[in-house]
């Protein structure tokens, strides 16, 4: 190790005195400190060639000043915002609504809630107003409609598909014949634990499916609402990570305060009324093995304190803040909002509204469904030809299934609440997700589906799986049209 430290500085044509060497050697992450010191000297003290403990102190002080430098709002922006109204209403927030002991009875209540909610939506379809209970399908019925939750999906050696479904009265086996090519193809996106409607017939043993329907949104009249303002969406900031793109984030804050970009971009900033943050504001602690090696801030309280300092420069627009799986709250979904226990300064910031994951907010008549997106992992694992880059396809699936995390018992931990809060009860105007660090936007049946990317540069884990994040590219819903701003360059 000693030779490695000396060689790294020699390569940069720098020398170490003994005290500086001892301090660097004693640092648990000396490789990172060496690189930071070399970069600091090249930018600030390029006439220096001997590193001392004072050099290290100067670097540390400069870091504090750089990180905590206040970003003042443009007077024109302040004047515009002082005259605008920013009404909002929290429609769904599950914080302090957790009623579960984790026993089997709670699990039954949870799945009954899911079934009842989604059954009600499916029955908005006139064909499913009257349905057969599964316990009655043990006889010959030529024309039946049933609604059930999927227990299992299997393929036969002849290419048929067998789907086992369940309702409160019993179970049934649905067969999709291999000669029904359209139905076979559409059934490839079925997953366990979702609720579907089936039209067909039964011979008393198997239900032959002629049609499978999802709760869907096709029967809902979607109207593009008038929107004479802008909403900014971000997620996966990962403050505390070495890969947190702090410079780009500061440029983003400057833009939001009217001090960055060309005239068109500044005009767009002046039009912003809300900022929505969809989880993983900080990188967290102990989220995955050896995470501490990738952390610049190794204390969860300090991570949130730093987040409060950065967001503290935004003072006159509401910030809607929902947690993700890296945040300091319950891991099981639905996740309650962040509290003062870990994020006191953030909770005390007057313009920050802490909400759960998921949550629904009405921003001046624009209904936004916020969900961090952990269930994307399960969808990718369960379905062929889906990757984490297919965020638009995954969001479309969730809207059709009317559930944000339909698969139970996989990577996404779901709390067995008395009520299933991850059912999409009402169709939003905007579905905002994060988690996968890849930006996307499309409009599906009147709903803006957008994933807001990240402010974390590519991690070692992402390099292994060839995941290329879209870093510091911020989506803005401007008068109903999406604009994407890139803050990666000065």
Image (cartoon, rainbow, N blue to C red):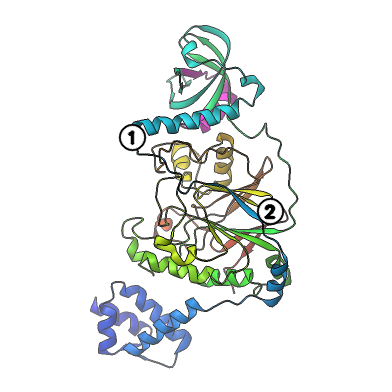
Q: At which x and y percent is residue 257?
A: 63, 71
Residue 26 picture location, percent across and down: 25, 77
Q: Quadrant of the N terminus?
A: bottom left
Q: Residue furthest top?
A: 140
Q: Is residue 374 above or below residue 201?
A: below
Q: Quadrant of residue 70?
A: bottom right
Magenta span contains residue 297: no
In this view, the residue in front, 291 or 43, is 291
Q: Residue at x 49, y 52 (%)?
A: 436
- Please give the residue where the numbered disc 2 appears in the rendered image: 364
- Which residue does the numbered mark 1 point to in the structure image? 103
Q: From what the image shows, is residue 452 above or below residue 116? A: below
The label on residue 380 is: none
Q: Where in the figure is residue 123, as x and y percent of width and height?
A: 61, 25
Segment colored magenta: 173-195
Q: In the image, is residue 203 above or below residue 110? A: above
Q: Of label 2 and label 1, which has the lower sequence position?
A: 1
Badge 1, how many Cα within 10 Å: few under 14, some, many 20+? few
The answer to if 179 sits in the magenta stretch is: yes
Q: Residue at x 33, y 79 (%)?
A: 8
Query: What residue is shown at x 45% (from left), y 10% (from top)?
Result: 205
């Amino acid at each position: 190790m000693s030779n490695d430290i000396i060689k790294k500085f020699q390569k940069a044509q720098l020398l170490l005195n003994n005290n500086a060497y001892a301090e660097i050697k004693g640092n648990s992450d000396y490789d990172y400190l060496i690189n930071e010191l070399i970069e600091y000297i090249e930018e600030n003290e390029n006439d220096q060639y001997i590193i001392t403990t004072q050099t290290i102190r100067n670097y540390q002080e400069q870091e504090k000043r750089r990180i905590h430098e206040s970003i003042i709002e443009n007077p024109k922006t302040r004047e515009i915002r002082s005259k605008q109204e920013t009404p909002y209403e929290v429609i769904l927030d599950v914080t302090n609504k957790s009623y579960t002991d984790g026993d089997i009875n709670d699990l039954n209540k949870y799945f009954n809630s899911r079934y009842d909610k989604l059954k009600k939506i499916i029955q908005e379809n006139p064909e499913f107003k009257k349905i057969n209970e599964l316990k009655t399908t043990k006889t010959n019925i030529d024309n039946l409609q049933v609604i059930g939750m999927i227990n299992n999906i299997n393929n036969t050696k002849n290419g048929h598909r067998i789907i086992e479904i369940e309702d409160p009265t019993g179970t049934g086996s649905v067969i999709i014949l291999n000669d029904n090519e359209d139905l076979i193809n559409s059934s490839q996106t079925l997953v366990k634990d979702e609720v579907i409607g089936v039209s067909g017939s039964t011979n008393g043993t198997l239900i032959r499916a002629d049609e499978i329907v999802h709760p869907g949104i096709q029967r809902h009249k979607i109207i593009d609402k008038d929107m004479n303002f802008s909403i900014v969406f971000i997620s996966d900031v990962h403050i505390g990570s070495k890969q947190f793109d702090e410079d780009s984030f500061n440029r983003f804050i400057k833009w939001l305060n009217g001090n960055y970009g060309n005239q068109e971009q500044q005009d767009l900033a002046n039009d912003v009324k809300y900022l929505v943050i969809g989880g993983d504001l900080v990188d967290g602690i102990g989220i995955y093995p050896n995470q501490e090696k990738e952390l610049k801030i190794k204390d969860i309280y300090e991570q949130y304190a730093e987040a409060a300092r950065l967001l503290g420069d935004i003072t006159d627009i509401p910030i809607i803040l929902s947690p993700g799986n890296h945040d300091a709250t319950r891991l099981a979904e639905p996740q309650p909002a962040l509290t003062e226990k870990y994020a006191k300064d953030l909770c005390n910031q007057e313009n920050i509204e802490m909400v759960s994951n998921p949550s629904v907010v009405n921003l001046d008549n624009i209904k936004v469904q916020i969900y961090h997106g952990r269930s994307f992992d399960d969808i990718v694992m369960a379905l062929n030809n889906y990757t984490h880059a297919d965020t638009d396809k995954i969001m479309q699936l969730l809207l059709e299934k009317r559930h944000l995390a339909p698969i139970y018992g996989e990577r996404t931990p779901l709390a067995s609440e008395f009520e299933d809060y991850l059912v999409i009860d009402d169709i939003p105007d905007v579905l905002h997700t994060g988690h996968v660090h890849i930006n996307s936007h499309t409009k599906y049946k009147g709903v803006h589906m957008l994933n807001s990317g990240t402010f974390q540069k590519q991690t070692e884990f992402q390099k292994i799986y060839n995941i290329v994040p879209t870093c510091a590219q911020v989506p803005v819903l401007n008068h109903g049209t999406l604009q994407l701003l890139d803050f990666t360059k000065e």
